[in-house]
Image (cartoon, rainbow, N blue to C red):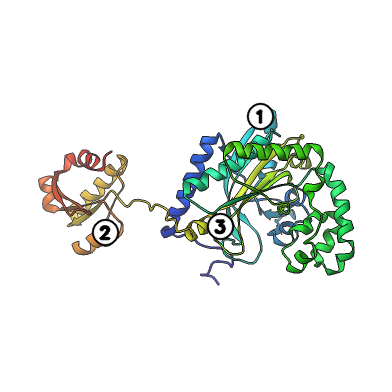
Amino acid sequence: MLTKAPKGTKDVLSTESFKWQYLERIFREVCESFGYKEIRTPVFEHTELFERGVGETTDVVQKEMYTFEDKAGRSITLKPEGTAPVVRAFIEHKLYSGAMPLKFFYITPCYRYERPQAGRLREFHQFGIEVFGSSHPAVDVEVMSLVYNIYKILGVEGIELSINNIGCPKCRTEYNKKLREFLKDKLDSLCETCQSRYEKNPMRILDCKNERCQTEIIDAPLMVDYLCNECSDHFEKVKEYLEIAGIEYKVDPKIVRGLDYYTKTAFEFISNEIGSQSTVCGGGRYDGLVEELGGPQTPAVGFGMGMERLLLTLENNGIEVPREKGLDIFIVTIGDKADKEAFRLLNNLRKNGISADKDYLERSIKAQFKYSDKLESEYTMVIGDDEVDKGIVSIKNMKTGEQQEVKLNNLIDELKFKLGR
């Protein structure tokens, strides 16, 4: 056990980390073009934040949170999602007193105790954005457009956008009444979790993954048929702005999302390439969450995207992430004097923005060249004690095999020229 990672976690080795770095770079570039700024929140929060924010009737809170008491007896939870911590930071630092809207993005680890499966681990990584301060439907579409742009840049095909409007507290009151009436005679056939949700939040029952429950609720009334005028108007405008943006979508009235804080717009980007877990990104509007957590009434909208799922989607679509380039130059040394000179050169090369390395295992010349090749070095330089005395070194282009002698005092300028720096 000591030398094995806990179940549901995964090491990202150097052979894979370049893929993560590529995605993170794309995220940052797209967010910058949309005017979003990065926010970072702690990896753990007070448990009450998620109980009140995410919702006591959700699977996340009821079944999946990593919760423990610290040494002072306080209940602490590893964050299972990224939105509630950002809202907490928004309130704590009184960011609502500044110019609105405020646009944030984050890349963060999250933790949920659930059965590990394709694209979903117990420790997973979430890319998300949150917008505070605007109730305009165009902002909902901007959020979806940001996701859409990322998929386009990555070259992902076959991703479908599904949208719904899940109402507000005003119109949900009537809907919940109708839903309870529908479910009343089916309660005994529902799972224990759904039975517990019947009085507190019957809408959560629609999100149950239990096959027996899904069969029982197949003809359940839909929220979209009970929307108030405000929610209905908002939904129609969202669809209008999606058409303006040129983003194809379909209305799926059964989308409710798995967290209690959503209101009005809910959306999912769906992929059929990663097995049973087909939602690769989900989000929506949560106009009441800031107030629920103790802040002023503030409309908000956002999304969360699992990075593991996105990587799996890329793989299943046959999309290769560009590999990171190798070293600019590797120095092969012959002799003690040359070894010390090579170490001095390394420092100068790196100071000048040239990636460089040398042998530290006293390998043979042949083995050093093999190691240079494994590091995918663009150039390999050979320096021995005689070359140090003469002030001349030999540089080999590892792709073409071309070799050239270069004066040591011109080495940096010559390499910059060859590398196009």
The residue drawn where x is 45% and y is 49% is 22
Q: Which mark is residue 373?
A: 2
Q: Position of residue 45 (x, y in %)?
A: 68, 49
SS label for mark 1: loop
Percent x, y of residue 294: 77, 39
Tell me the tag on residue 291: none
Above or below 167: residue 72:
below
Image side of residue 320 versus residue 1, left or right: left
Query: Which residue: 57% across, 36% down?
Result: 36
Expressed as whole percent of the image width and height from the top left, the position of residue 216 reads 80, 65
Confirm or deny contact between disc 2 and disc 1 (CB under 8 A): no
- Give the number of the disc on residue 309: 3
Q: Amino acid at mark 2?
A: Asp
Task: Tell me whether circle 1 and circle 3 mark residues in contact (CB < 8 Å).
Answer: no
Q: Quadrant of residue 125?
A: bottom right
Q: Which residue is mark 1?
A: 100
User: Would you call the spot at circle 3 few (<14 residues within 10 Å), some (14-19), or many (20 or more)?
Assistant: many
Of the numbered discs 1 and 3, the one sitting upstream in the chain is 1
